[in-house]
């Protein structure tokens, strides 16, 4: 009998299944596939970036024995880093905005991370969590600032693991892929790799309101309007990781579409997903409609819904935000 044993946390990251989302496939006439990143050991796609950034820092000597990993994050990267830190003998300090879900804040503390919450502030402010994290790393002896937005080990994780997995799992039969962007790591690494395999693959961004990336991709200028309940995605600048992305275009999705899609997939497919994954699924339907029937479309199911249960799956919270789901089909997605 052949044994199949993975050694430790590091070897448990990746090789997630590619799931055919049957309800969306039937509704669009395309094969719509979701990369089930919520099945990583830390529960999200960010496990890949966290592991790569730590391993590369060790190789470069910027993270030494007994050191402290410091990062500013909306939560999921921090969770991945805290787990990697525990597995490899480091301390973790995580700075995050106070408006992120309580589930992620509580989980980080449960994992042993030192969590510092900051008031939400624009990137231009020194009080923005990104700048606070950088400052904390300068104050802590023997520390490593992961800097996920500009650290290219982030997108390398997806260039060397996520994208090759998708290519292999589809047998190279892939017509399009769509996803949202926060740090730009996933979209940068995945689209760069897939375009090298087949330049004809349609690569698209799906961006929430309140982010400037949709405008940047479609017009070349950053212009953000409104805001969004989505966490960890949407930004108003081009990061080093995002600049690796090779894109054909972009779509925009609304909070109402995110909530409707999350409820739709839970009811029809048994998929319990977070806000960015729901937005990605909205993007997959938009891309399927753009390309037409008979195409194969992939997207990223970034994390599960358990980290957002008190918000996007809470009827009272949704009613307060004016986001109560009412759709019976996919009529909430415009063409």
Image (cartoon, grey):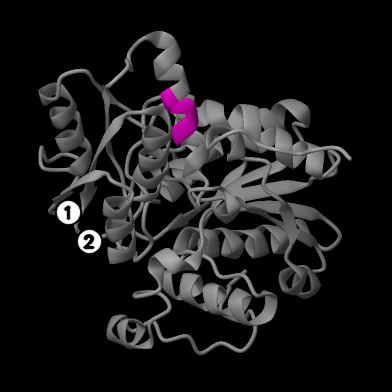
The stretch in magenta equals 50-54
Q: Position of residue 214 (x, y in %)?
A: 45, 49
- Which numbered disc covers residue 99? 2
186 inside magenta stretch: no
Q: Position of residue 127 (x, y in %)?
A: 10, 42
Secondary element under disc 1, as helix, strand or loop, is loop
Instruction: Please tell me whether residue 262 is drawn above or below residue 182 in the rendered image.
Output: below
Q: Position of residue 86 (x, y in %)?
A: 37, 36
- Which numbered disc covers residue 335? none
Question: Does residue 218 appear to the left or right of 170 in the view shown?
Answer: left
Q: How many marks?
A: 2
Question: Does residue 251 appear to the left or right of 98 in the view shown?
Answer: right
Label 1 close to label 2 by CB (< 8 Å): yes
> Where, by quadrant of the figure, is residue 307 drawn?
bottom left
**Which quadrant is home to the N terminus?**
top right
Q: Position of residue 171 (x, y in %)?
A: 86, 40
Question: Does residue 208 appear to the left or right of 123 in the view shown?
Answer: right
52 inside magenta stretch: yes
Query: Dot 1: within a 10 Å radius of its alpha carbon, few (fewer than 14), some, or many (20 or more) residues?
Result: some
Instruction: Please tell me whether residue 240 is drawn above or below residue 33 in the rendered image.
Output: above
Query: Dot 2: within a 10 Å radius of its alpha carbon, few (fewer than 14), some, or many (20 or more) residues?
Result: some
Instruction: Using the rendered image of the protein, determine whether residue 246 is visible from the camera's viewpoint.
Output: no
- Could you tell me which residue is drawn at 59 percent across and 77 percent down? 266
Quick one: 56 or 237, which is closer to the camera?
Answer: 56
**Which quadrant is home to the C terminus?**
bottom right
Instruction: Using the rendered image of the protein, determine whether residue 47 is visible from the camera's viewpoint.
Output: yes
Question: Which mark is first along the chain, 2 or 1?
Answer: 2
- Could you tell me which residue is drawn at 38 percent across and 62 percent down? 230
Secondary element under disc 2, as helix, strand or loop, is loop
Q: Which residue is mark 1?
A: 120
Quick one: 81 or 65, which is closer to the camera?
Answer: 65
């Amino acid at each position: 009998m052949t044994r199949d044993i993975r050694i430790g946390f590091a070897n448990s990251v990746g090789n997630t299944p590619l799931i055919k989302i049957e309800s969306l496939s039937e509704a669009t006439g395309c094969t719509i596939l979701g990369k089930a990143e919520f099945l990583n050991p830390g529960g999200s796609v960010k496990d890949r970036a966290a592991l790569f950034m730590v391993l590369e820092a060790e190789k470069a000597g910027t993270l030494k024995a007994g050191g402290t990993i410091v990062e500013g994050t909306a939560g999921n990267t921090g969770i991945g880093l805290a787990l990697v830190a525990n597995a490899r003998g480091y301390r973790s300090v995580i700075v995050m905005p106070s408006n992120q879900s309580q589930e992620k804040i509580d989980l980080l503390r449960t994992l042993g991370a030192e969590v510092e919450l900051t008031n939400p502030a624009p990137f231009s402010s020194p009080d923005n969590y990104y700048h606070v994290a950088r400052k904390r790393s300068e104050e802590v002896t023997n520390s490593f600032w992961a800097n996920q937005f500009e650290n290219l080990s982030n997108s390398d994780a997806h260039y060397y693991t996520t994208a090759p997995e998708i290519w292999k799992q589809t047998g190279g039969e892939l017509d399009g892929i769509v996803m949202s962007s926060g740090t730009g790591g996933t979209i940068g690494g995945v689209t760069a790799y897939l375009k090298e395999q087949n330049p004809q693959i349609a690569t698209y961004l799906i961006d929430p309101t309140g982010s400037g990336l949709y405008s940047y991709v479609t017009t070349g200028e950053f212009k953000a309007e409104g805001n969004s309940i989505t966490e960890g995605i949407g930004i108003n600048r081009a990061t080093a990781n995002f600049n690796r992305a090779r894109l054909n275009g972009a779509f925009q999705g609304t909070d109402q579409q995110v909530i409707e899609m999350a409820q739709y997939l839970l009811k029809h497919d048994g998929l319990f997903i977070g806000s960015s994954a729901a937005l990605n699924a909205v993007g997959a339907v938009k891309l399927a409609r753009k390309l037409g029937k008979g195409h194969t479309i992939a997207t990223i199911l970034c994390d599960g819904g358990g980290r957002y249960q008190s918000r996007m799956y809470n009827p009272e919270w949704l009613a307060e935000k004016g986001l109560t789901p009412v759709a019976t089909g996919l009529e909430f997605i415009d063409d």
